Amino acid sequence: MRQLYTFFRSSTSYRVRIALSLKGLDWEARYVSLPRMEHKAADYLATNPQGLVPALVEDGQVLTQSLGILEYLDEVYPEPPLLPRAPLERAYVRALALIVSCDIHPLNNVRVLKALKARWGLADAAVDDWYAHWVAEGFRGFEAMLARAGRAASYCLGDRIGLADICLVPQVANARRFNCDLSPYPRLVAIADRAAALPAIARVAPQTQADAF
Amino acid sequence: MRQLYTFFRSSTSYRVRIALSLKGLDWEARYVSLPRMEHKAADYLATNPQGLVPALVEDGQVLTQSLGILEYLDEVYPEPPLLPRAPLERAYVRALALIVSCDIHPLNNVRVLKALKARWGLADAAVDDWYAHWVAEGFRGFEAMLARAGRAASYCLGDRIGLADICLVPQVANARRFNCDLSPYPRLVAIADRAAALPAIARVAPQTQADAF
């Protein structure tokens, strides 16, 4: 049985839970508490020397970095596919996934917010404004790409859920948790809400997890 | 002929130039000056609504997000491959590429450093220290993964250059530009230096570009 090292509120862990669930793959959860700094403990560093979640262990092999894990899962367990077949469509889906994964999430995850506060004594309101800024920058581009490409229907590419939607759902959930104004992005919000309501995604949402508080 | 929207010092543009060069693909450069804010001008936003470089235009199709572009190029122009064939090896190479692309570069690119200064009036030294912190965090994990996986030889995976090396070269160059201490990371520095010395990479280095200053 595969093991997933996960924290309920980690949006990169959530991405991997969604992909496993969509593909009907079981896993044993290994909970890693970020507030208790368990990701920096020696036993976890022995699994993932980067000290970040998630990590997926299959047959004793440790896989890290959520986007790499999603690509791996799609290669080894191809049904249902997370990426389309045509290279240009794959590039479109990956570009959307990368807007979230490279241009929003890295600037807003908890280690960065903590670093901002610890380094420069910033107040919560200043850090929340930082968070909202990068959400707005990224979502503006995401929404514009959806509008211009004209490829979205129920999901970012037609009516099949995939890699971009998997990255979008946790980011929209987190943006709401930080009270970001999402009204300028009706397309992406509708897609994220539709995806989040799917039973396969709802059952792995942060608040359903055994480590949620 | 394909067009690459590029800025000489942009490390994500540099990644794409390296991949095109390794695959022997020609391109016409369209220079986008970040200091002159040309990436936010209307004509560039008409190409890439995200207002970021690089963008690659092939047959009128606009591709954005450097990692997505690299995957696309590898799918459409498979020789020489940037990724190995075995899924676990692909996951290893992608994880290394993603350490640079998600955990270092997004925190340290010029738009972020400018935002830090503009928002909180931080001095150059404070921002340089921020830069060095995320390089150290990311490179520590990268080096540890190289050491533990035991898969590196001339490059991150054996003796074939690939996706991880392509992301590593620009990040090491930038870390040096910011005077980061790279002595704790002998493996990754040796790989980056070996890769950067290849003629196919040397000829697309930032200082060789027509827009360099």
Image: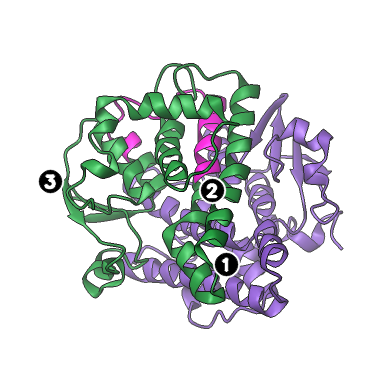
Chain colours: A green, B purple
Please report the bounds of the magenta region as a residue range.
A73-100
Does B37 sit left or right of A94 as displayed? Answer: right
Task: Residue type at mark 2: give it.
Answer: Ile
- Tell me, for residue A104, which label it has, or none: 2
Q: Where B29 falls versus B171 (above or below)?
A: above
| Circle nearer the N terminus (2, 3) | 3
Between B202 and B181, the one nearer to me in the picture: B181
Residue drawn 61% across the image and 63% down it: B108
The lab-note entry on whether marks 2 and 3 share a chain reads yes
Dot 3 corresponds to which residue?
A1
Task: Residue type at mark 1: give it.
Answer: Ala
Between A84 and B112, the one nearer to me in the picture: B112
Which image quarter: residue A145? top right
Dot 1 corresponds to which residue?
B192
Q: Chain of mark 1?
A: B
Q: Where A68 falls versus B155 (above or below)?
A: above
Q: Where A151 falls versus B123 (above or below)?
A: above
How many discs appear?
3
Percent across and percent down for residue A161 are: 39, 25
Q: Is residue B177 visible?
A: yes
Q: Chain of mark 3?
A: A
Residue drawn 78% across the image and 43% down it: B40
Q: Is residue A83 visible?
A: no
Q: Name the secondary structure under disc 3.
A: loop
